[in-house]
Image (cartoon, coloured by chain):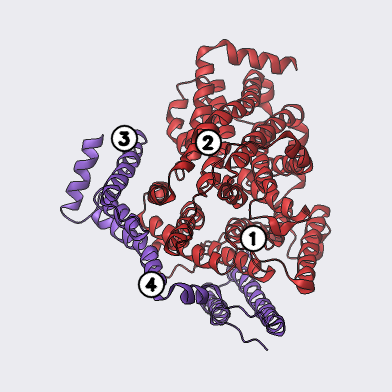
């Protein structure tokens, strides 16, 4: 019998955990509603039931597929396991940075502002995705930044975040005045 | 016919009317293509100025904008997986994979032709059958019918794009759960808000779909570069042949019907029309597993239906004074600014206005064909830019688009989190399309279920004695049963994205 992969176990644990947490949290709004007999928790709980049923279905399907693959001698690892075997830890480090960089940008956006942070974010993203030529690391982010900022700030008059922190706020406003 | 000709003559006899017609046309194409800044943005910006125009010109501007804006978002959906507007989201399901396979020209050509065809058919139907259809649909389609339509849609959604049926259901369930965040649609109770004011309004649709489609795609391409397996998308400007379209004649006809019918129903509109039509294309297909991988029929179904919904949305607005969506609601505002009320009396008191609007919508849909063709031939060349240079531009465009919806930096964070979730789920065989379908159908479904239960007095037997409800619920149950049977018999082929 073929055992489930780590990824498959993770998925099962994730979905049952997700459904359990959602069910427990649904008691926070499980109150009587005068105009609607079923209340506010009925619909989310129906969805939770659907998720649990599908998770069980997936577990059964995974076990059946692994058994069949083991019988045929064609067991395969999960996607991320294959990536680890093929590319080593470096794959996860680079992908981790690739995914985390936009989150860091979003977290900084409100405080340091769009106008200051964006060129650095674009250059960093370009670098982490494999572009290491200095010329392109300067030209491409600047070109994208100038064109998109001009279109949205000047032509469409969209108010982009200027930042809260002192200095960044002044810089952001200075750029806005410059463009408009 | 005489009235249509009179409306056309009124339209072309005034240079100002022609200018307004083309402003609406180009404005819709442009604003529809920019994520976050959609046709509603332009419609809202224009609202204060519409009082300066005649009622006919002002209403005509909005009607033309509705037609062209609905098509506009298809181009970026196909080229970059960025739906310009929610109604173009299903277009990306198959349009973008087609672009990846070097068939961008074919996908955009299909989108242009089908948008134009769907819109024109809808305009013709609108012209001939407005009072009759409006009366029937509005009388026979209440919350129970809309709920059963949503149930049917959810049943079909599970079969779109995931590696197994169960992963399809998990994807849809995840989308449905996201839709429950915020205030419940019946009593306004707070659900899953964790004490954050931001979550009270729910997870906004635009940042979420930008994350699910555009950002996750950038991550997928970035991963290919990290693995050293990145290939430039192939470039071609080959449009679909007439023979290919002829093969899809049934899909086109079905999409016109679905789109037109969904458009008539207040509160449904072009977005749900596109999703429902896509679902129907999958359900009727002999090879449903090919959807989500670059099936031309997916693009055809979505784009035909969303434009077919535009003409239909005018029917309840003009015949009964019921707006079906945000843009038609703004049109009610324009009527009121001119001391008019949309409804049956408009046909009596302002028939010239009605026929100018009908004529303008008819010609707008025909113009989409020509302008869309020219736009395609130029915009398609963006694919020649190496993706590593395009990726930061897509991320920035999505960032600005997500932020501009509500001027909230948190929306940008939500978009990136959605992008990461979608990337991980795609890599594990889940369906982004399924999540989005669950997200959009969830709120509509819950609201209409609650209203339906109140209408039938919580009596399920009374619910299923309504013929349309019975048919749709049975069709949904049959779809679920068939899918489970197929899955248990041998499973489906995997989907690699």
User: Which SS class for mark 4?
Assistant: helix
Give the spatial CA distance, label 3 vs label 2: 26 Å
Label annotation for residue A90:
4
Closer mark to the observer between disc 2 and disc 1: 1
Give the spatial CA distance, label 1 vs label 3: 40 Å
In the picture of the structure, the residue carrying the numbered disc 1 is B161
| Quarter of the image where one finds residue B429 | bottom right
Extreme-left residue of the structure: A167
Label annotation for residue B330:
2
Give the spatial CA distance, label 3 vs label 4: 42 Å
| Display colour for chain A | purple
**What chain letter is assigned to the residue under label 4?**
A
Q: Position of residue B380 (x, y in %)?
A: 51, 38
Extreme-top residue of the structure: B13
| Quarter of the image where one finds residue B219 | bottom left
Whether tag 2 and tag 1 are in contact, CB under 8 A, the answer is: no
| Quarter of the image where one finds residue B472 | bottom right
Q: Where is residue B422 in the image (x, y as percent from the top left)?
A: 51, 63
User: Which SS class for mark 2?
Assistant: helix
Could you tell me if residue B250 is visible in this image?
A: yes
Closer mark to the observer between disc 4 and disc 2: 4
Upstream in the sequence, badge 2 or badge 1? 1
Q: Where is residue B267 in the image (x, y as percent from the top left)?
A: 62, 46
In the picture of the structure, the residue carrying the numbered disc 3 is A154
Chain painted red: B
Whether tag 3 and tag 2 are in contact, CB under 8 A, the answer is: no
With respect to residue A51, does B102 lie above or below?
above
């Amino acid at each position: 019998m073929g055992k489930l992969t780590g990824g498959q176990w993770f998925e099962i644990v994730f979905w049952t955990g997700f459904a359990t947490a959602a069910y427990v949290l649904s008691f926070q709004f499980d109150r009587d509603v005068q105009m609607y007999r079923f209340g506010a928790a009925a619909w989310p709980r129906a969805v939770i039931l659907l998720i649990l049923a599908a998770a069980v279905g997936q577990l059964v399907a995974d076990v059946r597929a692994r058994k069949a693959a083991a019988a045929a001698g064609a067991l395969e690892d999960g996607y991320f396991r294959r990536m680890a075997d093929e590319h080593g830890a470096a794959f996860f480090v680079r992908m981790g940075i690739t995914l985390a960089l936009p989150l860091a940008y979003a977290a900084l956006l409100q405080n340091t502002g769009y106008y200051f942070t964006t060129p650095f974010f674009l250059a960093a993203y370009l670098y982490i995705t494999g572009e290491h030529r200095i010329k392109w690391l300067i030209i491409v982010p600047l070109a994208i930044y100038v064109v998109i900022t001009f279109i949205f700030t000047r032509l469409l008059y969209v108010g982009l975040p200027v930042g809260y922190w002192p200095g960044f706020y002044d810089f952001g406003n200075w750029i806005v005045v410059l463009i408009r | 016919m005489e009235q249509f000709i009179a409306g056309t003559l009124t339209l072309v006899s005034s240079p100002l009317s022609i200018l307004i017609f083309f402003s609406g046309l180009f404005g819709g194409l442009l604003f529809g293509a920019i994520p976050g800044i959609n046709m509603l943005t332009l419609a809202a910006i224009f609202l204060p100025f519409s009082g300066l125009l005649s009622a006919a010109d002002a209403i005509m501007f909005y009607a033309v904008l509705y037609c062209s804006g609905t098509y506009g978002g298809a181009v970026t959906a196909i080229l970059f997986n960025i739906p310009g507007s929610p109604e173009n989201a299903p277009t990306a399901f198959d349009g973008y994979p087609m672009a990846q396979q070097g068939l961008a020209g074919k996908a955009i050509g299909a989108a242009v032709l089908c948008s134009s065809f769907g819109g024109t058919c809808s305009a013709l139907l609108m012209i001939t059958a407005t009072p009759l259809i409006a009366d029937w649909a509005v009388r026979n389609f209440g919350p129970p019918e809309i709920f059963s339509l949503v149930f049917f849609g959810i049943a079909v959604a599970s079969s779109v794009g995931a590696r197994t049926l169960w992963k399809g259901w998990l994807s849809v369930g995840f989308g449905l759960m996201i839709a429950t965040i915020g205030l419940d649609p019946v009593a306004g109770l707070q659900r899953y808000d964790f004490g954050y004011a931001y979550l009270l309004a729910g997870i906004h649709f635009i940042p979420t779909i930008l994350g699910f489609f555009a950002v996750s795609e950038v991550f997928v391409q970035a991963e290919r570069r990290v693995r050293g397996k990145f290939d430039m998308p192939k470039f071609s400007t080959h449009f679909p042949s007439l023979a290919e379209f002829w093969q899809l004649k049934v899909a086109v006809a079905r999409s016109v019907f679905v789109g037109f019918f969904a458009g008539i129903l207040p509160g449904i509109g072009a977005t749900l029309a596109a999703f429902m039509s896509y679902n129907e294309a999958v359900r009727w297909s002999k090879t449903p597993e090919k959807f989500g991988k670059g099936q031309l029929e997916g693009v055809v179904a979505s784009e035909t239906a969303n434009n077919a919904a535009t003409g239909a949305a005018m029917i309840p607005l003009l015949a009964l004074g019921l707006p079906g969506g945000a843009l038609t609601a703004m049109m009610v505002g324009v009527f009121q600014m001119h001391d008019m009320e949309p409804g049956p009396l408009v046909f009596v008191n302002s028939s010239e206005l009605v026929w100018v609007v009908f004529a303008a919508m008819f010609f707008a849909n025909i113009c989409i064909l020509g302008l869309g063709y020219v736009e395609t031939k130029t915009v398609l060349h963006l694919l020649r830019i190496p993706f590593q240079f395009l990726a930061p531009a897509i991320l920035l465009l999505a960032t600005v688009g997500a932020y501009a919806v509500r001027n909230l930096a948190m929306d940008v964070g939500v978009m990136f989190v959605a992008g990461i979730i979608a990337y991980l789920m795609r890599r594990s065989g889940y369906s982004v399309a399924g999540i989005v379908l669950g997200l959009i159908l969830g709120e509509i479904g819950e609201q209409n279920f609650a209203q339906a239960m109140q209408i039938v007095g919580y009596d399920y037997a009374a619910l299923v004695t309504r013929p349309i409800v019975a048919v749709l619920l049975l069709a949904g149950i049959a779809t679920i049963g068939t899918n489970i049977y197929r899955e248990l018999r041998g499973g489906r082929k995997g989907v690699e994205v």
